[in-house]
Amino acid sequence: MPGPPRLGIAPHITGTAPTTRGADVDDSKTVIDETSSAPARVGGPDIEATLEELRAQLDRVDRALLDDIRDRMLLCARVAQVKRQHAIAVVQPGRMRTVHHRAREYADRHGLSAEFVRALYDLLIDEACRVEDRIVDDARPGGTRS
């Protein structure tokens, strides 16, 4: 059985666009065709309202994504405190490989670009290391930074 379509690579993606509008709209025929220059039918005749709803959903997902990134950084700060207390090196190559491996598996299972997910996790890990370095360095004699 083939896996999910590769997002951004697949010639088309089909699905049902969520909507909060009335029952008079047939969302079962929602098709996004990335290869066509003609506007696709998206949830009915009121394309602007549909786009507005989809963009509102994207805004909600973006807020949740940023909240999750903030939570990840707070956890990284707690990890750094433990590393500082027990004199553990900030950079843990084995852990980094594990995180990248899990992200790659997720990308493969969900049709995401492995290159994109790798780049995203490179950024997340770089920021985590920066946060951890700062916490560990601040605890060293003469290591206070502004």
Image (cartoon, rainbow, N blue to C red):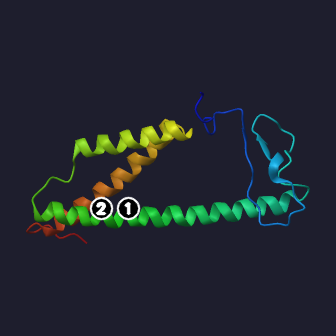
Dot 1, crowdedness within 10 Å: few (<14), some or many (≥20)? some
The disc at residue 76 is: 2
Indicate the position of residue 42 as horizontal and vertical percent values.
Answer: 83, 51
Q: Quadrant of residue 93?
A: top left
Is there CB contact under 8 Å for labels 2 and 1? yes
**For residue 16, above or below residue 138:** above
The residue lying at 63 percent from left, 38 percent from top is 8
Left or right of 65 on screen, residue 85: left
- Expressed as whole percent of the image width and height from the top left, the position of residue 144 reads 17, 70
Q: Residue 60 placed where, x, y %? A: 61, 66
Quarter of the picture holding the N terminus: top right
Write the residue at 87% across / 40% down: 38
Give the residue drawn at x 9%, y 58%.
87
Q: Which mark is residue 124?
A: none
Name the amino acid type tagged 2: Cys
* Residue of label 1: 72
The residue shown at (75%, 38%) is 34
